[in-house]
Image (cartoon, rainbow, N blue to C red):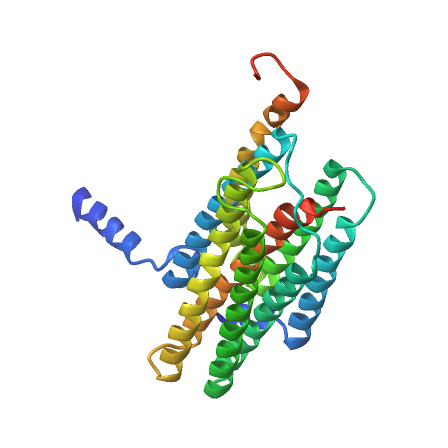
Amino acid sequence: MTTAQEHKSGGIGKDLTVYLCLLALAGLQFVIAYQNIDASQMFVRMLAVAIVEAVLAVMFFMHLWAEKRGFLLFVAVFTISVLLAMQYGWTDSFRMLVGAPFSK
Amino acid sequence: MSQADLTMEGHATGLTAGPAFSIPTKKLAMWLFIIADTMTFAACLVAYGFLRNGTPDWPRPFHSITNVALMTFILLTSSLTMLLGLRSAKMGDQAGAFRWTMITAAAGIVFALLHVREWLGLINEGMTLFKNPWGTGLFGASFFSITGLHLTHVTAGVIALVVVGLRYKGGRYNADDIEILGLYWHFVDLVWMFVVPLVYLLNLAH
């Protein structure tokens, strides 16, 4: 679409490498699912792998890396800040399990 | 030149200065849609995680990962075929671009069929939106909502792939349109990377 993007997007080799990395990371998630660890640890590990996968896909498959720096920053900062803001209620999700007051 | 003229001229210059971030307007619109859709899926997954944390008898109904692993492989591979289609389009290989776009659509159809098979298996085991044989009824509602929302995106993507592919072949669309559609398709793939661990893998019956 833009000349800069065409220069920075690389060849088919880069696409294949990213694809194989994504396959490997997806496989890693399945391996983690069969590890003998508790659910919270499993969740954290799987989420970490998923975030790495997402970054690879956004940067290289969606070519965000090749866009203008200002646009990359806009997408990253705006999206991440809203996603982080959604996380404020997690501690409350354990209320039913720990039997806090007013939970019943 | 009066102050009013200067102000008007300033406004006119601002309006015709080109698209924001110096990227084409259609592409910017797709990125804004993707950002908004990210929030939708994130809200669904956070709500799902909240319910799962707060519910002691959360079901773990999945005995096999074969189907979901196959679905993941197909969707990831379809992202690669989408890239190959875009590459062909940018090189002016119209036939190649159309072929890869249709292969991507076919992969999307296979994914959707496997997804429906997964759903039918669970429905045959007694799972509905409001109850299931394994635990809290919230599981069915959240499972069908999240995977249904994703399946809707895949279905819409397949339709878009066919339409854009045909119009590209007919000369009405160009490589830019293939690229914009590719953004959407990769996003659908990206969302699946979070749905699989949270909805399927954390609920495996060990």
Q: Position of residue B67 (x, y in %)?
A: 65, 62
Q: Nearer the viewer, residue B24 or B162?
A: B162
A18 in relation to A79, above or below: below
Residue B12 image-quadrant placement: bottom left
Q: Is residue B89 visible?
A: yes
Answer with left or right where residue B97 lies relative to residue B198.
Answer: left
Q: Residue A34 location, x and y as percent?
A: 79, 50
Residue under the point 58% across and 57% down: B121
Frontmost residue, B68 versus B153: B68
Given the current orientation, which residue lies at the most extreme top position?
A101
- Residue visible at 65% across and 47% down in the picture: B61
Q: Is residue B8 above or below residue B165?
A: above
Quadrant of image for the C terminus of chain A: top right
> Which residue occupies 63% across, 15% down?
A100
- Asked whether residue A1 is in view, the answer is no
Q: Could you say where residue A55 lies in the image, as x and y percent from the top left?
A: 63, 54
